[in-house]
Image (spheres, rainbow, N blue to C red):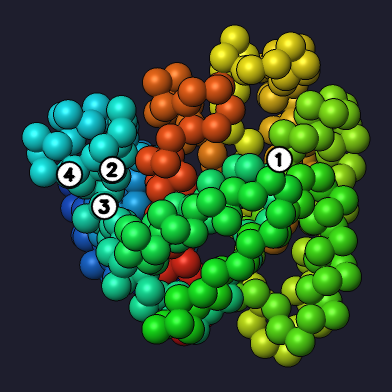
Amino acid sequence: MVAACVVLFVPMWLAGWHLSRNKVLFFSGALFVSLAVGVHLSPYLPSVPHILATSFFLPGPGAASSGSSCVPFLHRVAWSDAAAAAAKGLGGGTARTWSWPPSLASTCGFARLSRDDASLLLNGSWVMVAGDSQARLLVLALLRLLLDPAAAAAAEPELFRRHSDYRAAVPARGISVDFVWAPFESNLTRLLREDLRLAPRVPDVLVLGSGLWHMLHVTDAASYGDAMASVAGAAKSLRSPLPVPPPHMFWLGLPHLVNHMLNTDAKRAHMNGTMLRAYDLEVDQRGLVRGDGGPFLLLDVGKLTQGCGQQCTADGMHYDGEVYDAVLHIMLNALVIESQQRI
């Protein structure tokens, strides 16, 4: 490039200086220089469609191959009534159902995974989800995808035993699924610093999330932020000494809270919109998620639950299965992208 510029521009500049006394010759020379520069440098410049795609924050046609450029668009889902979705052949048994816009799905390759596809993606993997009731609902969505309906229904009562851990397996694919009851951030830090560090193997996929119990029982955003910094530090220390590829790490965000629907006075007093925004801000600022240099890819439950709306929740905190199905498929599509990048 440097040699081409020297060979091209120096003679052209000298010629232009001599031709500047004659306007016709000058403009003819300028046109020739412009065409020459365009021909010689066009292979090194981005195409016009690429410039337009970048300008409007949309992934270009090559985004599916590069993968990482599509990650910011994973949460850009659309919600529609189940009746309208059924008319389009999309199914749906709840009040609302979700989908990626067709243009985005075709550009980035986002798709709902079938049971076979999800089993193939997670073949031989250990998936660990730790947190509170939101994490438990994500595990239920995963089991409903991996298991047949009868097996998933049989597993649900055991999964929802109060304040208990749960373990499931898909023997045909060698998939293990663990739920760890960890409602407070200190539980997650201990899991990362002690339990997993001493284990002979770390999970292939690790999903953590907390905040609802802290908001209800502590109600201090700054304290929650300090706890988030501890979780981030523990996650980074878990990744650094591993001789094998580190786990794929996801952070399960807080749901949108509908204050007047919460079922106790204490919840309505402490779990309001102002407190929720303060807690979300601490997650953004404490080095937890990737946008802030952290190890976790955010699963933005707040955005998804707000998009689904009040009709998707009975208690203002826990949402219909379709929401956690969307969370699950966002995570699985992110795994597809990350797996391709690691290869």
Of the image marks 2 and 4, the number of the one nearer the N terminus:
4
Residue 126 or 18: which is nearer the viewer?
Answer: 126
Q: Disc 4 vs disc 3: which is toward the camera?
A: 4
| Type of the residue with mark 2 | Ser
How many other residues sit within 10 Å of disc 1, few (<14), some (14-19) or many (≥20)? some
| Type of the residue with mark 1 | Asp
Q: Which percent across, then down, holds residue 230?
A: 87, 53
Q: According to the image, label 4 marks what residue?
A: 90
Q: What residue is at 44 percent from the left and 58 percent from the top?
A: 154
Q: What residue is at 51 percent from the left and 74 percent from the top?
A: 169
Residue 341 or 86: which is nearer the viewer?
Answer: 86
| Type of the residue with mark 4 | Leu
SS state under label 3: helix
Determine the CA span between mark 2 and mark 4: 9 Å
Q: Residue 284 carries which label?
A: 1
Say if mark 4 contacts mark 3, CB within 8 Å: no
Q: According to the image, label 3 marks what residue?
A: 105
Say if mark 3 contacts mark 2, CB within 8 Å: yes
Q: What residue is at 71 percent from the left and 40 percent from the top?
A: 284
Residue 166 or 225: which is nearer the viewer?
Answer: 166
Determine the CA span between mark 3 and mark 1: 27 Å
Whether residue 333 is visible here, answered yes or no, is no
